Image: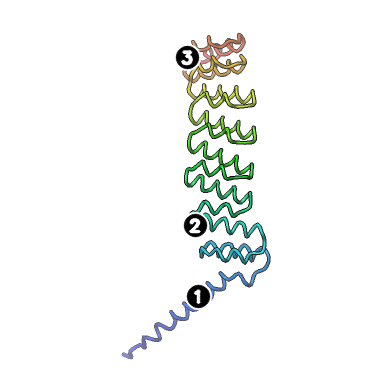
Amino acid sequence: MKKLNPYLLILPLLVLLVILLYISLSGSSCSKLTGNEKDNCLVHEAVVQEDITLCTTIVDTNFKEYCYTELIKLSNNASACSTLQDKRKGYCLTYFAEKQNNSELCTGITDTPWSDVCYGKMAKMQNNFELCRAINYSSDRDICYNHLALQLGQRQPCLRIDDNNKRVLCQADVAILLKDILLCDMIVPNNVQGMCATTVALSLDDANICSHTRDGVIRRNCEHKFTKII
């Protein structure tokens, strides 16, 4: 039997490797692209290779800033965020604040929307409703307090809410969450207090709780619900 030449077995493998290498190199090269496609390609290459020098070759400012941001994130160097423009800096510091569970990093953000996002995230992460106070926009601050009230199961954050209607509903939500009729009793106006008491009564399957309802119509409706159940 004629012996096979081992080089004949290796040759096809070498050819295949050359083809794959060519495909790989041609696919990763950004030089043949133009405009945003080229910039986007360079961002990808910079991140894959962790080579920040590739970011300097990017033309579009947004892509360039994005490239620097992603490389800074990979470097785990929060202080480098200060080299970025306001919005990117805010995003960058928020990323590290979450990653390091460090609310102090939020203080370095000058872009108001990102500052609010940072403090909101950290308040939830650290179960600390005091951080909501640092949020600039009233509506976002109210959302933060409301979220923490339910997350902690506490009435106190609700009392910090600026909007009166939201403040009252927040208290009702906490009372219903805890099934605490005494918290319902603290609520004004009577219609919300009645809704709260009725919900707690049904939740605990206790008709006697209906007597806590200050509004006569709502109290009778509460009692009627138990009559229907029976």
Crowd around label 1: few <14 · some 14–19 · many ≥20 (10 Å): few
Q: Quadrant of the N terminus?
A: bottom left
Q: Which residue is mark 2?
A: 75
Extreme residue in the left direction: 1
**Which amino acid type corresponds to the residue marked 2 in the rendered image?**
Ser
- Residue 68 or residue 147, whichever sits in front: 68
- Structural distance between the alpha carbons of marks 2 and 3: 59 Å
Residue 224's image quarter? Answer: top right
Q: Which residue is mark 1?
A: 21
Local secondary structure at mark 1: helix
Residue 192's image quarter? Answer: top right
Q: Earlier in the sequence, mark 3 or mark 1?
A: 1
- Structural distance between the alpha carbons of marks 2 and 1: 29 Å
**Which amino acid type corresponds to the residue marked 3 in the rendered image?**
Asp
Local secondary structure at mark 3: loop
Nearer the viewer's eye, disc 2 or disc 3? 2
**Which amino acid type corresponds to the residue marked 1 in the rendered image?**
Leu
Crowd around label 2: few <14 · some 14–19 · many ≥20 (10 Å): few
Position in image of residue 57 (x %, y %): 62, 67
Q: Earlier in the sequence, mark 2 or mark 3?
A: 2
Q: Inspect this view and state whether residue 201 appears.
A: no
